[in-house]
Image (cartoon, rainbow, N blue to C red):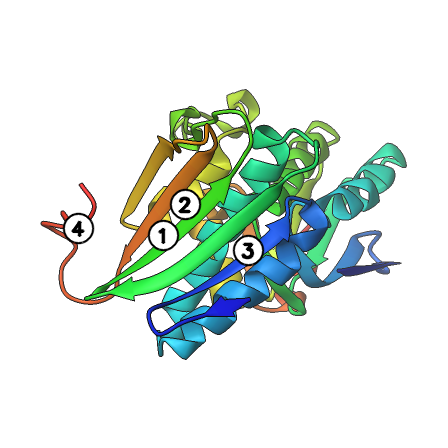
């Protein structure tokens, strides 16, 4: 784990076995920033889901790394996940339709649905190196309107 | 994650799930539930009082088990969710698809 005055970052192998270590890193980073427990839980869930997506759908079991950076900017928490997997935009995954009866529901897209529920913005872009960058923005206080920090 | 299973006097199977259920550990829970369903155990109660974390991978496993259990005439019930796990169930919309209670007593009765 790297730490400087404004951000902390972690680089790990993109394996599902590392999800627990990723959650610990995010929890410690968020706790260092004095976030409340509910917010910590939310971002731990969001990063876990995003990292799972990268390992499963991005690298598809092939070797690779995930770099996670957590930093606070004003009243928002920014979490960047970078990988070198083929371009994969998790925000394009269809969200499960919760209004459809259980028996008829396709159980997919739940991960991105959860991410969207617990953070305020999810932005995907392809990096100049051809990998992926997923930016998760969590507003820390005040109302959630007019959140134009990364648009 | 650890799972321990016991059968109550009324034939209901109690699964104590401890620790974290994420994309790495969810297959273990999936196997435990599928093994029980394959033996026609369709009345399943998950003791989540020691469950510290669950992600969508774990929720999918529970949801699949619920579908299978219902087809066999039973259901999956859950009790003892901590605040974080309950919130995850709620935002996923799973809380409306399962019998969720606070205590083991509530979950084990009324079958």
Residue on which the image places disc 4: A149
**Residue with the most extreme top position:** A104
- Tell me which chain the residue with mark 2 is part of: A
Whether pointer 2 and pointer 1 mark residues with C-beta atoms closer than 8 Å, the reply is yes
Q: Quadrant of residue A115?
A: top left
Determine the secondary structure under disc 3: strand
Compare marks 2 and 4 and give the one earlier in the sequence.
2
Where does residue A44 sit, x and y in percent of width and height?
48, 59
Residue on which the image places disc 2: A115
Residue on which the image places disc 1: A118
- Same chain check for tags 2 and 3: no
What's the CA distance linking mark 2 and mark 4? 18 Å
B98 in relation to B38, above or below: below
- Same chain check for tags 1 and 3: no
- Same chain check for tags 2 and 1: yes
What's the CA distance linking mark 1 and mark 3? 22 Å
Taking the spot 47% from the left edge, 25% from the top edge, the residue there is A87
What's the CA distance linking mark 3 and mark 4? 39 Å
Q: Quadrant of the N terminus of chain A?
A: bottom right
Compare marks 1 and 4 and give the one earlier in the sequence.
1
Determine the secondary structure under disc 4: loop
What's the CA distance linking mark 2 and mark 1? 5 Å
Where does residue A23 sit, x and y in percent of width and height?
56, 61
10 Å crowding of disc 1: few (<14), some (14-19), many (20+) = many
Residue on which the image places disc 3: B100
Q: Quadrant of the C terminus of chain A?
A: top left
Determine the secondary structure under disc 1: helix
What's the CA distance linking mark 2 and mark 3? 23 Å
Taking the spot 62% from the left edge, 31% from the top edge, the residue there is A59
Whether pointer 3 and pointer 4 mark residues with C-beta atoms closer than 8 Å, the reply is no
């Amino acid at each position: 784990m790297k730490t400087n005055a404004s951000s902390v970052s972690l680089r790990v192998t993109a394996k599902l076995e590392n999800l627990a270590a990723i959650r610990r890193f995010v929890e410690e980073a968020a706790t260092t920033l004095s976030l409340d427990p509910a917010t910590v839980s939310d971002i731990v869930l969001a990063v876990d889901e995003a990292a799972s997506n990268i390992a499963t759908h991005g690298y598809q079991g092939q070797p690779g790394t995930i770099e996670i950076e957590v930093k606070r900017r004003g009243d928002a928490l920014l979490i960047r996940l970078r990988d070198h997997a083929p371009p994969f935009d998790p925000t394009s995954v269809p969200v499960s339709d919760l209004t459809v009866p259980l028996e008829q529901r396709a159980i997919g897209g739940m991960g991105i649905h959860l991410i969207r529920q617990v953070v305020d913005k999810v932005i995907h872009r392809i990096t100049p190196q051809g990998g992926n960058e997923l930016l998760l923005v969590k507003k820390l206080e005040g109302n959630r309107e007019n959140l134009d920090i990364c648009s | 994650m650890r799972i321990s299973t016991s059968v109550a006097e009324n034939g209901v199977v109690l699964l104590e799930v401890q620790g974290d259920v994420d994309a790495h550990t969810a297959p273990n829970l999936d196997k435990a539930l599928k093994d029980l369903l394959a033996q026609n155990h369709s009345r399943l109660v998950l003791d989540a009082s020691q469950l510290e974390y669950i992600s969508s991978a774990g929720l999918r496993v529970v949801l699949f088990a619920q579908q299978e259990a219902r087809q066999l005439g039973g259901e999956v019930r859950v009790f003892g969710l901590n605040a974080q796990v309950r919130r995850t169930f709620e935002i996923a919309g799973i809380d409306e698809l399962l019998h969720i209670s606070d205590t083991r007593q509530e979950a084990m009765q009324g079958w």
